[in-house]
Image (cartoon, coloured by chain):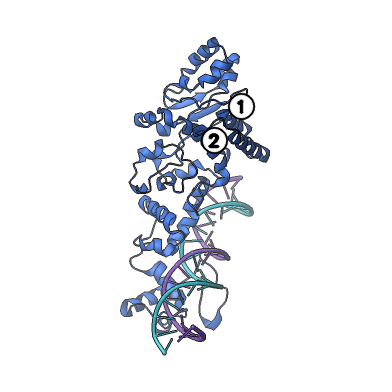
Chain colours: A blue, B cyan, C purple
Amino acid sequence: MGRAPCCDKNGLKKGPWTPEEDQKLVDYIQQNGYGNWRTLPKNAGLQRCGKSCRLRWTNYLRPDIKRGRFSFEEEETIIQLHSILGNKWSAIAARLPGRTDNEIKNYWNTHIRKRLLRMGIDPVTHSPRLDLLDLSSILTSNLYNNPGSDSHMANISRLLAMHSSSGSINPELLRIATSLVHDPVGNYYAPAQLDPLDPTRMIPDQVLTQHHSLSQIQALQQQMAGYGSTGQVHIAESNLSDDHRDIAQDYVPMMPFNGFYNHGSEQSALTMPAEQSSSAAFRPPNAQNFSMNSVMSTPSSSPTHFKKSHSSSNVYINSSCTSTEDERDNHTTSNSAAADNCSNLMMMMKFEMPEIFDVSEFIY
DNA sequence: AACAATCTCAACCGCAACCGT
DNA sequence: GACGGTTGCGGTTGAGATTGT
């Protein structure tokens, strides 16, 4: 393995080291110590340049090097330090005993960086990628702040048009995004108070009372009552009567999004309990830092299933990752409902763009 | 089994910082 | 301060390993 030698100037050997060369280098350094890398290869009887010897020693032969897979803690530390130090691999390595800068750099590029990208997080800034976040950020802004303002509506219209014309997002996703801020006749309504333990509470009352009869609502609520009893939200169109399918279209299923959550500037992500990570709401986009836990391979906080039929308008979500009572309770608070709606949207985007959001990547 | 695609990681390269003269 | 040599760092490469078809 390794890069092939590009030249062989000065008669010095390049390329992969042989066991014999390794032994020579180790023997010499054990007897004489290292330093003065320029003269070392000659003294050690190696046909290598000093630079190559130094690299071989520091990255491979050093006795205190820890080999093998990075632990969860090491991975967390790397991400946290990278968010502070950037690509200062040597500085990061200095805080990870037994790991070399080269090893950390490789691990970052082959594992962590890809994972962050698929989460929609910019691996350079550790912030959400703006191209993916525009939609949810504007939605969040509207839901929290000034729902009726023309400028916000214009932003959303422009954004939805942009995403729609790009063809990269399922039209239904756009419909759901639109439904977050518009009722069927274009009026804004507040996000529904969502409760996975009580699916009937997912009905946005304003819409229902405006556009559907009370009997329709009651019948739908009865049909819905059987679903979502085990943390699973399942709205199957085939199980609804014809009269109520259009109402179901207005529903936004609840799915906590575990990808992003806030942590205070003084609070280390390393100390944040997993329960918090799995229940935290989506963070507004002006936030600069995201917790490491959100991108770690934490089984307890990883979405294990997210399935949505492409061939119909069914919405089927298994939210088993938030199946504990404590976690569910966190989602019943009204002040998180709006953020949860955006979280739902982000989860759906995650499903729609697997090349960016790869859920399976987070599960060991 | 054969081939292609993708991933991994040891090693190279170029540059900047450092140090002694 | 200028210069040259040395060291260290970060980006990149590409052979071999692994996985998928």
Q: Quadrant of residue A153?
A: top right
Q: Quadrant of residue A207?
A: top right
In this view, the residue farthest toward the top is A215
Name the kind of residue labelled 1 in the image: Ser
Q: Secondary structure at mark 1?
A: loop
Query: Is A294 situated above or below B14?
Result: above
In-front residue for pair B7/A289 = A289
Q: Is residue A94 visible?
A: yes
Residue that protrudes farthest toward the left in the picture? A31
Instruction: Give SS at disc 2.
Output: helix
Q: Nearer the viewer, mark 2 or mark 1?
A: 2
Q: Which mark is residue A139?
A: 2
Residue A312 circle label? 1
The mark that comes first in sequence, 2 or 1, is 2
Q: Relative to the observer, which residue lies in front, A280 or A182?
A: A182
Residue A162 % position (x, y): 65, 40
Compared with B15, A249 (above or below) is above
Q: Give the number of the disc on residue A19.
A: none
